[in-house]
Amino acid sequence: MLTKRKSGEAGRAKLQAIAAGLSSGAMDRRSFLRRSGLAVGGLAAVGSLQLGAVRKAQAAGTAVSGPQVTIKKNICTHCSVGCTVTAEVVNGVWVGQEPSWESPINRGTHCAKGAAIRELVHSERRLKYPVKLVNGQWQRVSWDQAINEIGDKLLEIRGKYGADSAYWLGSAKYTNEAAYLLRKFGAFWGTNSVDHQARICHSTTVAGVANTWGYGAQTNSYNDIRNAKTMIILGGNPAEAHPISMQHVLAGKEINRANMIVVDPRFTRTAAHATEYVRLRSGTDIPLVWGLLWHIFQNGWEDKDFIRQRVYGMDDVRKEVAKWAPDEVERVTGVPGEQLKRVAYLFSHEKPATVIWCMGATQHTVGTANVRALCILALATGNVGKPGTGANIFRGHTNVQGATDLGLDVTTLPLYYGLVEGAWRHWARVWDVSYDWLQSRFDEVPAKAGRPARTRKQNMEAPGITSTRWFDAVNLPEDQVDQKANIKAMMVFGHGGNTVTRIPEAVEGVNKLELLVVADPHPTSFATMGDRKDGVYLLPICTSLEMEGSRTASNRSLQWGEQIVKPAFESKNDYEFMYLLAKKLGFAEDLFKNIKVENNVPSAEDILREINRGGWSTGYCGQSPERLKAHMKNQHKFDLVTLRAPKDDPEVGGDYYGLPWPCWGKPEIRHPGSAILYNTNLHVKDGGGCFRARFGVERNGATLLAEDSYPLGSELTDGYPEFTFGILKKLGWDKDLTQEELATIQRIGGNNVDAVSWAIDLSGGIQRVCLDHGVMHYGNAKARANAWNLPDPVPVHREPIYSPKPELVAKYPTRPDERQFRIPNNGFSVQKAAVEKNIAKSFPIILSSGRLVEYEGGGEETRSNPWLAELQQDMFVEINPVDAAERGIKDGGWVWVLGPEDNAKAKVKALVTERVGKGVAWMPFHFAGWYQGEDHRSKYPAGADPVVLGESVNTVTTYGFDPVTGMQETKVTLCQIQAA
């Protein structure tokens, strides 16, 4: 604990002074138990249990019993593990929460956040009604007034500045259906600037993994880690960030006797469980991975057959790896060569082996390259496509995987179709609207600063502005922003304002907006940023626990959440808000053409069915609402490790839990889903697959297709390209199509029917026929160790923008300045200036950031929960004892953390600990409500301020962006720390 109390009473008194929603008197133990729904005797009984005695009660019943009790299941709204929440509802009131024993994912367990989740619905600290800022004061308004005023202002801004002048920031808290709806909404509005939290957590994962072997997602599952014999956890702390996943990780370690290697600059709670802990300098992941491969290649430990059959370009990697002998690796990373040799031996010999990463790997200017290096490590050792192997990517928010899949990404339409004309025409067919009408909604962009003008079509196919740079698109001179006008309006749906770097510049951007709308259960830090007096609206949106819809966990499994209770206070769900706004803006009829709307609330089931009708490219076509509901009903039937149900079960027979995508074909085909991607040991009808043929068939005389490798039972026994109707005809398989399927293909293809591919065939016929013949419709290719379309086709080390070792920058510089996502990326100039000014001398401590177990994301929800707020009451910085002693800093004392840009500073408490090494500091990223030493509690609407406030670490984080995705560099910058 950061706050060291002499007595429990002192701690409670402090919390109560902040928490106006709690009783004014001290809350004793009995009151706490009564409010939290626990029985005193029950807690005493738990206290008497001996270690190892906890097991599922055989006939305990529920906490509340009787015919009036209704059991509802939904999904925890916090991290991406996908824990089931089992709620007891009486007369429309959520009165109790039971352990979800039947879920194969959480198996009756919850972390602190999941256990306290009922408070999100009951919380008195939520927004209760719409408010707007008038002369600096929050004023209550009706929903009708808010919608009308917001709609009028949006139309005014659109008319004056163009569609791109409004920015649409979505949410990883969304259901799949809401995420899809917002991306569709953006298309109808006429912009590709629709983004969400994935930009700042795993956009680099999606880009790196997809460009290596086909799809940008976790290859296996949390549960499958139980099969691993060796695991490398790099840049992740699941013990705090994904606590329930640790039961699967530790089962692998303890039951399977697996090697658990943790690589992190900080000795985390996860590292405490490791069989081997590797401490590296933050920002040197590629040298570390190449150091591992140096030993693997030197000793011939690579999987030569796997590389020959299923990998392209590994010789190019060998050339780069040869530069990273142990001495150079240690000089750059700080990791001894002998330790890396030991880890390399384990990963290549004690198999199956898996590599696990989180944001410690992704939040860098080389984030995409980091991810690629980790994938190449798995490929070189043959650790892909089998149980216990793969890239197990632990995503952050509850539905960050699904929201990314469904298109809250400035580079693509839903389900990774991209922005090319063919993708737009595909979705125009699904939406039953004219492609030409969609094109007409986009701006024409004038020529600026020597850049050519863009037509509507070109603008329609140009990626939007990333969420990491929205304020730059407000603040920069207009000729530097490559669209019709700068951003003038921000529409924020379920996203904090404290999660991007360079907050002083974000504050400037907020002040310059003409309109800011926040639609969220809580005000969020956007409500307190800047010195605005008007033009801000806060709209109460219910949590996903108060609405229906599906969520996709990290392992690609979809789960259906029931509405537990109706939305609290005056809040509305996301579907209704988007319907009302679309109605005001004039396109609701087309937006919801094939979606049932009752009492202004669109049907979540109908939205998912529309996703099914268009989601062929990623296999979101087979997970109908009916199938997902059957899985929730029959959770107990799925195996703990394989996640598969018995084949003879009448409702879910043979399915993998949650029908993890890709789940091919129409729902009636009953594809079981794909628990492990690229698994050639299974038939494609059984969840098997191969690497995807996305990048052609040949390059520089070398084949890009697999050699002597194919899924079990395939009628094609070598590599092959992705399927079109023309290829189907050449094989004579077109005769297997039904007349209805053929007619649909012909209608789509028109004069060029042979070009209709498996991904745009709305009949599903090409997929169905390929599955019947045991082949994969997306082709059978090699994974790419050389991804020639990326800035660095083979990953190379580049020093962080603010490097603590300026002497290395000349040899390992960041990429040259260039324009990306409509604005300049001047990282090279910033890095060069930092070296010339010797910033590392004035700011000698490396600063990184991460999660706490008590809080999540930007922290507004969890810091508003009194049971969680009690656990962690202060923002802090971890500092090594040597650094603290040199600066006269005492444990628990107030300090200033100073950043190298904008004279930024943050006032926090010091936690003196050896968790961080000398010259390294670490801060959690969940806090907001203070800004550079000032308490901004008074800026929140009355009663809607979080219980706990604090400085945001991103006040002092700095410039730096991944060239592929626009990811910010939050895991390594420089700072100075001094006593306050």
Image (spheres, rainbow, N blue to C red):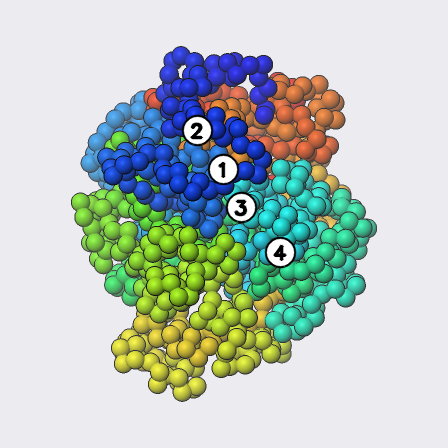
Q: Are marks 1 and 3 in contact (CB under 8 Å)?
A: no
Amino acid carrying label 1: it is Cys
Spatial separation of the CA atoms under disc 2 and disc 4: 38 Å
Residue 419 placed where, x, y %?
41, 61
Spatial separation of the CA atoms under disc 1 and disc 4: 24 Å
Amino acid carrying label 2: it is Gly
Q: Which residue is mark 1?
A: 111
Spatial separation of the CA atoms under disc 2 and disc 3: 27 Å
Could you say whether the residue bearing mark 1 is in a helix, strand or loop?
Answer: loop
Residue 679 is drawn in which quadrant?
bottom right
**Most foreground residue, 736 or 54:** 54
> Which label sits in the foreground, 1 or 2?
2
Q: Which residue is mark 3?
A: 245
Residue 26 is drawn in which quadrant?
top left
**Most foreground residue, 835 or 43:** 43
Q: Earlier in the sequence, mark 1 or mark 2?
A: 2
Q: Earlier in the sequence, mark 1 or mark 4?
A: 1
Q: Which residue is mark 4?
A: 228
Q: Which residue is mark 2?
A: 42
Could you say whether the residue bearing mark 2 is in a helix, strand or loop?
Answer: helix
Counting other residues with Cα less than 10 Å from the Cα at mark 1, is it few (<14), some (14-19), or many (20 or more)? some
